[in-house]
Amino acid sequence: MSERPNPNPTPSAPPLRHIARALVFDPADRLLLIAYEAVRPIDPARPEDRTFWFMPGGGLEAGETHREACRRELSEEIGVAEAEIGPEVGRCDGPFHLFKTPRDARERYFLVRLPDDRIDTGRLAETEDNPVLGTRWWSLAELEASGARIEPAGLAGLARRLVSGDIPEAPVTLSWRGA
């Protein structure tokens, strides 16, 4: 007797990936974000719009802690090797599908304050899976008023809280915008 195929197969879950990212602020309390091109439209009503903004960071390598990965990623992506990695202030867990390789992300976010706004993104494109469209320093007002796709949801509120000096005792849980 042969088995019939399941008419409603469950899509395979994306691979689990542990990730460290940084909320990088300059002395003017602007937040650095990187623009990426998504692999699919981010809004079905605007299929041509594939731009989303994300914090610098990336996956942990074998044997690395989140803090060590954050330091390495900042060096690779924005040319900042000696930044002080502050406290873990946020996290976001769950499937994320805007990058070429979907992932079940376990992201940890660290506070980083730079002494100036000088960064070097010369190696950024070579370290990324998705096309990098650019970087930008965002003021809190711009971040809060923007209609751009900024991941994860709640990032502007967390940024405002950090700039005001309110460092959470436990990391704030954020969520993806339906990614």
Image (cartoon, rainbow, N blue to C red):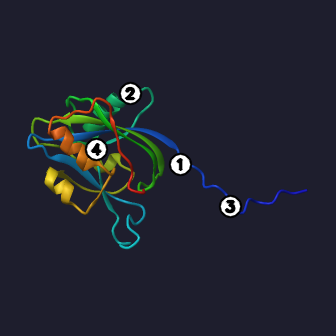
Task: Name which residue lies at 24% across and 41% down.
Answer: 23
Q: Quadrant of the C terminus?
A: bottom left
Q: Is residue 62 visible?
A: yes
Residue type at mark 3?
Asn
**Earlier-in-chain disc, 3 versus 1:** 3
**Earlier-in-chain disc, 4 versus 3:** 3
Tell me the tag on residue 78.
Answer: none
**Earlier-in-chain disc, 2 versus 3:** 3
Element marked by disc 4: loop
| Circles 4, 3 touching at the beta carbon (< 8 Å) | no
Residue type at mark 4?
Pro
Tell me the tag on residue 14.
Answer: 1
Q: Nearer the viewer, residue 29 or 121?
A: 29
Q: Work out how far the residue at label 4 is from the one at label 3, CA to CA, in angstroms.
A: 38 Å
| Residue 67 percent location from the top left of the image | 32, 29
Tell me the tag on residue 8.
Answer: 3
Q: Work out how far the residue at label 4 is from the one at label 2, CA to CA, in angstroms.
A: 16 Å
Residue 19 figure quarter: top left
Q: Residue under label 2, please give it.
A: 65
**Earlier-in-chain disc, 4 versus 2:** 4
Q: Work out how far the residue at label 4 is from the one at label 1, CA to CA, in angstroms.
A: 22 Å
